[in-house]
Image (tube, grey):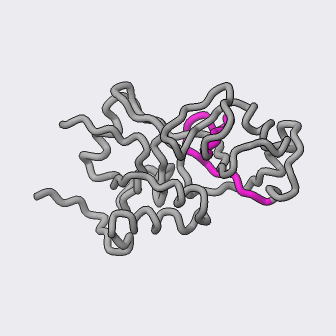
Amino acid sequence: MDTVNLTNHFLIAMPNMADPNFSGTLTYVADHNDEGALGVVVNRPIDLDLSMLFEQIGLSLPEGLRGQIVYLGGPVQQERGFVLHTPSQPYSSTLNVTDAVSLTTSKDILEAVAQGNGPAKFMVSLGYSGWSAGQLEQEMAQNAWLSVEADPHVIFDLPPEERLPAAMKLLGIDFSNLSDEAGHA
């Protein structure tokens, strides 16, 4: 199979996705290389908002951010925070995916948010989605996912329930028209 790099792409779970961790999800791939892939689900809010999260880690949250939701980024390391954000100041542990999207895992980004110096746009998730070497490619070949180049607007400017349909629209496809049966020509 040809090697494809899905960094900065959305993975759209096909209707036949059997894994409940990914059924109905839109995942942003932050890194994909010959060792595997790392992504964050961007449309699965959990019953936790930033106010509660910041209280748990001993930080105060600026008033304008109260009520902002936290997401379940995937089944791996759900006790750890992953912040997708627009690039801003450097943080201790940041992967600059593109000029428009970065992923930070260090607490200093949350401290910056608490001080009002955080990135202009961000979303916080607990956990991430990970694939070992060749695993994502195999799942793509089995028609488990569709992929499309990511648009930061979908992540940062749309409510979670609109993100999957918006990603489908990038492909020119209506999600309701997808079959849960795989076909091969």
Rendered location of residue 153, percent (x, y): 54, 59
Rendered location of residue 25, percent (x, y): 48, 56
Residue drawn at x 46%, y 56% as measured from the top left: 23
- 24 sits left or right of 108 in the view: left
Q: Residue 108 falls in which quadrant of the image?
A: top right
Residue drawn at x 74%, y 43% as measured from the top left: 118
- 156 sits left or right of 3 in the view: right
In the rendered image of this protein, does residue 84 appear above or below residue 96?
A: below
In the rendered image of this protein, does residue 184 appear above or below residue 142?
A: below
In the rendered image of this protein, does residue 84 appear above or below residue 134?
A: below
- 54 sits left or right of 179 in the view: right
**What residue span does the magenta drawing correspond to?**
67-85
Is residue 75 covered in magenta?
Answer: yes
Q: Residue 17 falls in which quadrant of the image?
A: bottom left
Rendered location of residue 155, percent (x, y): 55, 56
Q: Nearer the viewer, residue 179 or 173?
A: 173
Residue drawn at x 43%, y 44% as measured from the top left: 8
What secondary structure predominates along the stretch shown in magenta? strand
Q: Nearer the viewer, residue 178 or 64?
A: 64
Rendered location of residue 75, percent (x, y): 55, 41
Is residue 177 covered in magenta?
Answer: no
Residue drawn at x 36%, y 73% as measured from the top left: 174
Q: Nearer the viewer, residue 157 or 168?
A: 157
- 185 sits left or right of 21 in the view: left
Image quadrant holding the C terminus, namely: bottom left
Image quadrant holding the N terminus, namely: top left
